[in-house]
Amino acid sequence: MIIFQGSDDKIVHPQVSRQMAKALETRGIPCEYIEYPGETHGFLRKESNI
């Protein structure tokens, strides 16, 4: 699983996503957590396009 998270997300706070990633890994489920600085919930910044 890959979790993409904006550091300025006010809907799903980054700490919640970090905890989820850690919980998945603790249960043996591979997970990559990628946080985008300055990004909000909708990933609207051009620099964040993948």
Image: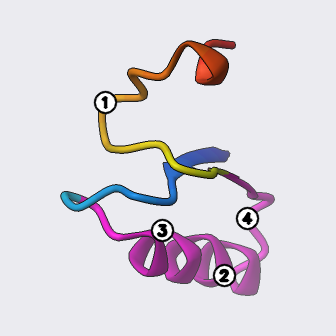
The secondary structure type at the circle numbered 3 is: helix
Which residue is under mark 2?
22
Q: How far apart are the alpha carbons under marks 3 and 4?
A: 15 Å
Residue 36 locus on image (x, y percent): 63, 46
Disc 4 marks a residue whose amino acid type is Ile
Of the two numbered discs 3 and 2 on the same chain, state the one appearing first in sequence.
Answer: 3
- For the record, the magenta segment spans 12-35
Q: Earlier in the sequence, mark 4 or mark 2?
A: 2
Residue named by callout 4: 29
Q: Secondary structure at mark 2?
A: helix
Q: Amino acid at mark 2?
A: Lys
Q: Residue furthest left?
A: 11
In the picture, which quadrant includes the C terminus?
top right
Q: Is residue 10 left or right of residue 7?
A: left
Q: Mark 3 and 1 residues: CB-CB less than 8 Å, in contact? A: no
Q: Earlier in the sequence, mark 2 or mark 1?
A: 2
Residue bearing mark 3: 17
14 or 37: nearer the viewer: 37
Q: Secondary structure at mark 1?
A: loop
Which callout, 3 or 2, points to the residue nearer the camera?
3
Report the Cα–Cα distance between label 3 and label 2.
9 Å
